[in-house]
Image: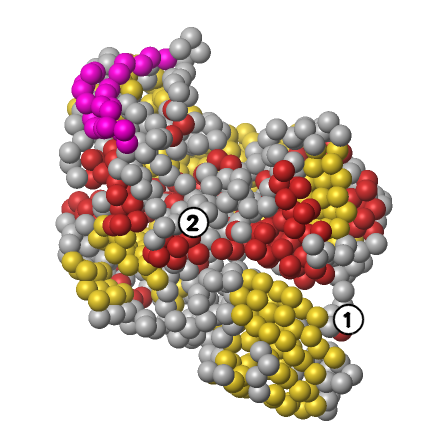
Amino acid sequence: MAKFSSYCGFILFLLNSIVLPSSAQNKHTFTSGLLLRAGTSYGREALYTDPLAYALYTNTLRTPVEGEVFGKDKDGNDIKWTKITVDGESRFRGRGASNGYVYYEYVASEAQSAVLNITGNATVFINGEPHMGDPYAAGWMNIPLKLKKGKNEFFVRGLGRQTVLTFPSTPIFLDINDPTVPVIPGVRGIISLKAAIVVVNSSAVTLNKLKMRSSLGGKEMTTTLPAVPAYSTRKVYFDFDPEKAASEGQNDCLLSLLQENKVIDQKTLKIESAKPGDKYAKTFVSGIDGSLQYFAVAPQTGGEQKNAALFFSVHGAGVEAIGQARAYESKDWGSLVAPTNRRPRGFNWEDWGRLDALEVLNIAKKQLQPDPQRIYLTGHSMGGHGTWFLGATYPDKWAAIAPCAGYPTLKGYGSADGLIPESSSSELGQLLLRTSNQSDVPKLAYNYKKLGVYVLHGDADETVSVKYARQMKSQLAAFHPDMSYYEYPGGSHWYGNHSVDWLPIFDFFKWHKIPVSKSVETIDFTTASPGISASNYWVSIHQQIIPLKYSNIKLSRNLDSGTISGNLENVALLKLSLSDFPQGKTINIRLDSLNTLNYTTVSTTDSLFLERQGNTWQFTKVPDMKVKGPHRYGTFKEGFNKNMVYVYGTGGTKEEQAWSIAKARFDAESWYYRGNGALDIVSDKDYSKAKYAGRNVILIGNATTNSAWKTLLADCPVQVNKNTVAIGSKKITGDDLGAYFVWPIAGTPSNTVSVISGSGLKGMNAANANQYFAGGSGFPDIMVFRLKMITDGIDQVEYAGFYDNNWSLK
């Protein structure tokens, strides 16, 4: 990447920076400053460009002065600071502002706690420490901080609409502006429900003994809360008793935050009740991170019934799941369930949005007990992409799919976080882009063969062009025998509830069923990673030859003659389920026109593992859980699930210690904002495998600064120490090396540790940007890069690659 790209960055410097002491006010709004076009680019990939951050990390960033030159753009022109002020609506505006920076200065008369709220920015550096922004202008992203006496600096990426410092009267308080709440269903007899709100801790100590007391209609419940770190927020869930709730409408739930049984704050939360048969929201504790999430239900007419259909509807960007459910009229032959993608924008139904969809699907199956052959998938806009993506990734879970106003891939339509790049001129760049292969739906299109596909799109859609529907229609028409397509005449992006609740879609669904396994005689299945999608009916890809390159299986079988044959691409280890064959049946297996293997079934639950060895396929034993497989396959991003815990280092220099906890806070804020989630953050001294058994780990620091390194990474071939990164026998030196990598946690069946590391403070800062939380962004197992990557791009990536299937380095 060029040092200064065509993207525009902005920095605002407060001209009237000397303010009254905090005792004389409770908030300060920034109103004027300086503007700089600096060339900043963040997107859906590991690489990013940020010359201002580079100057900050190398201690070369000076306080701006009007007219001063910061640098040059790609055409060699000077980039200068210019004055800017708020408009009549008290907002900063400017061309190209969304990709830029903002600088504010606040002079405090004394060291004091405060809370920063910026609406519409991407991130912010506060006295050099990174914090999450509010890119979707939600308004509720509050950042507790400790102001130092004298000058405090705020570098804001993205021109925030409004920036306010507040000075709360109490350092610990409740924020109910971003709740996760159920809609109390019409069916009574429920003992307790769960909701969640935010606790703000602007004090210097971690809060470990907080409790929440809820009171609704006089019925009280008390819940012990998890730890809330110093200068941070945490969304916490609590129990409440709905017995005395109104039969319909809003209920006041009084919440009391208790510290050592004393009330330190109170808020009243509104919780809605629904009539029997109305749409409702149901909360659940997610296995991804232990936070509270919800899904919405449009129940079947007359009440939910077993063995009815299940319609799974994924929402568009900015749409709440309960709003998605309410866009549909209830159906008399099934219930509709809408998951959340973790947030209305979240992860584009990829990454943790995908995991949320799978989690809710499993809950819905248990709760509603639908006909296992009548499960259907649909969605609108971003949810149209989710439909294309989830349909191609898990084709055996749906009888039919119906993308509405959808785009197939983030390579062609990138939305807020930009596009996944199409290609790279370097081999290393191509490897990095390969890690996003799972997002490229057109490459997975043959997976739709067993599905009915109905495509709906308005022909006048200016938000998601109808060209995307026509693209998929053209591709599927070449091979798909069961596709219906309709362009709604004059239809914009949203032309009423029939943009999703379209009768022909549900009529199309009615005559489709998921085939039973015995009737599936041919399989044509492609996956980018067994760690994301491994199975299709009676076959599973357990290991690849080349990691994250597309793997394809084309197999045919005959239950009567007892044959399985076909061709495979990029498959190292294959599992065949033989449960559809009768006991005592001799089966002849021939793959890739090579040798023939014979096997006689012992029971009706037999399965086989086959391994490619040169020019032959051979039976092999059930693989050990220690090797790569669908349960634990990598990449670096795999560590950010399975109820992860962040472990920061307390060793090294004071600056390295401060970086470690600041990085944990930054990621926790980002995870909360993007994923409606919450993280446990503990020090290396407090971590042990036994205490956090069954949980993934995100380790921050290196072998020198984080004492948990010895516990989790002693056997890892990647070692990061002061001024050195060793990858097997390869050694890279310098204090400016950043690193991301993953490693299995020894003694566990499926847990991993993902490491955010650096060989010195410069390298640690190079690892600050958490692009791994951008939906669809790809990361390999291991990536090592220099700080200058953020100005010079791919040329400063020293290493990127994968472990082999035994978690070894070649």
Q: Residue at x 16, y 27 (%)?
A: 62
Q: Residues within 10 Å of mark 1 (few under 14, many from 20)?
A: few
Q: How is the image coloured?
A: secondary structure
- The structure residue drawn at horizontal position 15% and vertical position 36%, both measured from the top left corner, is 59
Q: Name the quadrant of the N terminus.
A: top left
Q: Amino acid at mark 2?
A: Ser
| Element on which disc 1 rests | helix
Relative to 52, does residue 529 appear above or below in the rendering?
Answer: below
Q: Is residue 444 above or below residue 91?
A: below
SS for dot 2: loop
Where on the picture, by quarter, is residue 83? top left
Give the left or right position of residue 562, taking residue 87 as reference: right
Q: Position of residue 656 (x, y in %)?
A: 19, 48
Q: To which residue does mark 1 refer?
A: 519
- C-alpha span from label 2 to label 1: 40 Å
Is 236 within the magenta? no
Q: In the image, is 442 to the left or to the right of 639?
A: right
Residue stretch in magenta: 65-86
Residue at 64% across, 84% down: 589
Q: Which of 140/244 is in front? A: 140
- Asked whether residue 743 appears in the rendered view, the answer is yes
- Residue on which disc 2 sits: 423
Q: Quadrant of residue 691?
A: bottom left
Foreground label between 2 and 1: 2
Q: Where residue 284 sits in the image (x, y, percent)?
A: 59, 49
Q: Is residue 375 above or below residue 729?
A: above
Residue 76 forms part of the magenta stretch: yes
Left or right side of 646 for 374: right
Q: What residue type is disc 1 on?
A: Ser
**Residue 512 in the image: above or below residue 324:** below
Q: Callout 2: few (<14), some (14-19), or many (20+) C-alpha neighbours within 10 Å?
A: few
